[in-house]
Amino acid sequence: MSTANGVFDESWYRVKDCRLRLLPGIELVRQRFKGEPWYVVCDKLGHQYFRIRPEAYKFICHLENENCVEDAWNEALRVDPENSPSQGDVVQLLSQLYRSGLLRGDRMADIEALAEVRKTEKATKTKQQWASFLFLKIPLFNPDPFLKKTLGLFSWCFAPLGFIVWLLVLGFGIQALALNWGEFKDVSEGLLGLSNLPLLYLAMIITKTLHEFGHAYACRRYGREVPEMGVMLLVFNPLPYMDASASYAYTHKHRRVLVGAAGMYVEIFVAGVALLYWANAGDGTMSRLAYNMAITASVSTILFNLNPLLRFDGYHILTDLSETPNLQMRAQQLIKFAVNRYGFGLRGQPVPANSLGEVLGLTSFFFASWIYRMFLLVSILFFVSKQWLIAGVIIAIVFAVMWLVVPIAKGAHYVISGTELMNNRSRAVLVSAGSILAVAAFLIWVPLPHYFRTDGIVQSNPFVNVYAGTAGELVSIDTPSGSMVEAGQLLVSLSNPELEEEAHLVELEYERLLLLIRSDQSVDGAQLEGLQAKKEALLVRREEAKRRLAELQVKAPVSGRWIAPSLHEYADGMVARGSPLGFVRGEREFRFSAVVRQKDVDRLFTEIGDTAEVKLFGQENVTMQLSKVTPIPAEQSQLPSASLGVMGGGNVGVNTNERSGSTSSEPFFEIRSTLHVPDGQIANHGQRGVARLRLPDLPLGRQWYLRVRQAFQKEYQL
């Protein structure tokens, strides 16, 4: 520890003669991480908890027995010179204890002497408060008396019986979700609609309150106090919170893990109950509230609380399971060490890791957490921007400042003014400037593969709808739905007694007319001309009757698979003329039709190749190939399918005055291609997908700009 900040410190003279002690009532709890002892300083009165290394713990023990700070430091050097703290470490430790209100001195001057030392810590704390202004906490009251009185009602939830109930609810909830997945997915389209926002926010308040009570009851179950409950402004959004930080002082890590997981444990249970209620209740306010609770309790748990890459419950669970305290800070220190050592040439600093495994683990955590935060930020921005452009822009600006501008500003200040780089300033500035220029040059000038993505739909070749040519009653389904058929094969038989009687009468009338013609020819032929005209008219009626009778036998117009999912609806009634009976689709040849907005036409029609790739919805893990990519150089307004329009779940604006939802609100261009389906995979007529068209290589910065512009054009019809 003595090498961390150097043996000596310029502020040492301010504290070396102070006679300081810990306040009465401070508890030091011993814990073990990877076989090494750590100590938790517990201030039960002020409800503050933080971990210190054994070297700091031994110094505090010496501080209790010596006359002043310098005597305690000298005694620590005498007892264990290799592991004793440096003067800088002592100053930092005393400043932290003083800031937390845990020190007392025999003279007021002892405390006042620490005021100067505290200035740096105070400035750092102020910066941290400004940096976290989107996560402000407002304490309201002490919930501990209520938790004590009601603990007996809920302690069984964390026992084996409670876990069995939890598993049963989770299992039935997953089953309900699987059985109603289509409806569940459809309802999510309006999740951020104005009419649903009050229910969504109410669901969030309820689930997060139960989440916090889960932490609180688990903490209280093992004897630790929960002194504070209040409101946390999470991005200006008020949500409840409880202070269960007393769990840090548990000696056994499994108790710390249980308290950390208790909130998610409760939320998953709530999600299961909400899913069961939603799946079995009729439409109504409570059903919609249950749906929103299922969403907030499951999605937020997976994306935020459970994920160890964010500093929520999953992160603290990971630090306990891996026995790596201050995981994020140590990862940042390791990256800072690598930059200082290999970039700025700063030598003599200790490696903030004890083994190669720790180096790899901390490095992986740093980059994984950074990438995930960026991915989550972009996903949230696009998700919110689909509903409210202004809100998306505001969130983008806020997070860009927090996660981009502020870190860059801190890095620049460290390079320009950091005391550690005093002797390496020139190299640090040159390396930093060179790195920035290299990244900028890469983004601006280095061409990389470039693609254009657009929505489209699969079309079977052939694909023919089958309609009832003549009205009639359903007699039999001669070919079951789902069967492969050949052209001309009988599919459905209909019966129409009135039509059959009419055809019979026409046939009798025709035979009678033939007899009249023969009789007239044998006499004088005076009426022959009129009879012949009547015969011609009767022949037309006869052929029409035969045609309509033949249409009662519905046959396959082409070869393919016969699909008739709604035939059972005609079992007890008449089939009207023109009623859809099903369709016959080919399964050997497919084409993919994609739509392109006018603003992208010029670039695409001149730059795309004749091959491309596509991923179909529901089969995102399979990449299929497109060939013979052919742009159709003519404006169109009728979409290949209504599912490509916004009313059908697509991105193309449609004319809301037209009921089919397949007429676009502005002209578009179509790109047709042949779809190649790999062996073992299937494609269905009407299945949506996203085509990726290869364009000439462009620098990455230019690609990002075009993709953002394309996304905003799609969402807001810019």
Image (cartoon, rainbow, N blue to C red):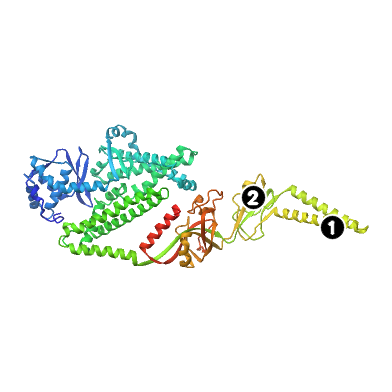
Residue 715 is situated, as x and y percent measured from the top left of the image, at 44, 53
Res 169 seen here: no
Residue 237 in the image: above or below residue 10: above
At 42% from the left and 54% from the top, the residue drawn is: 712
Which residue type does callout 1 highlight?
A: Gln
**Disc 1 designates what residue?**
532
Where is residue 709, by image quadrant?
bottom left
Judge by depth and name the residue closer to the eye, 617 or 133.
133
Using residue 384 as the reference point, say whether residue 283 is left or right of it: right
Where is residue 217, by image quadrant?
top left
Element type at mark 1: helix
At 16% from the left and 58% from the top, the residue drawn is: 420
| Image quadrant where one finds the N terminus | bottom left
**Disc 2 designates what residue?**
579
Judge by depth and name the residue closer to the eye, 150 or 19.
19
Judge by depth and name the residue closer to the eye, 586 or 540.
540
Query: Is disc 2 surrounded by few (<14), some (14 to 19) or many (20+) residues within 10 Å?
Result: few
Residue 76 is situated, as x and y percent measured from the top left of the image, at 9, 50
Res 190 seen here: yes
Question: Which comes sooner in the sequence, label 2 or label 1?
Answer: 1
Residue 165 is situated, as x and y percent measured from the top left of the image, at 39, 40
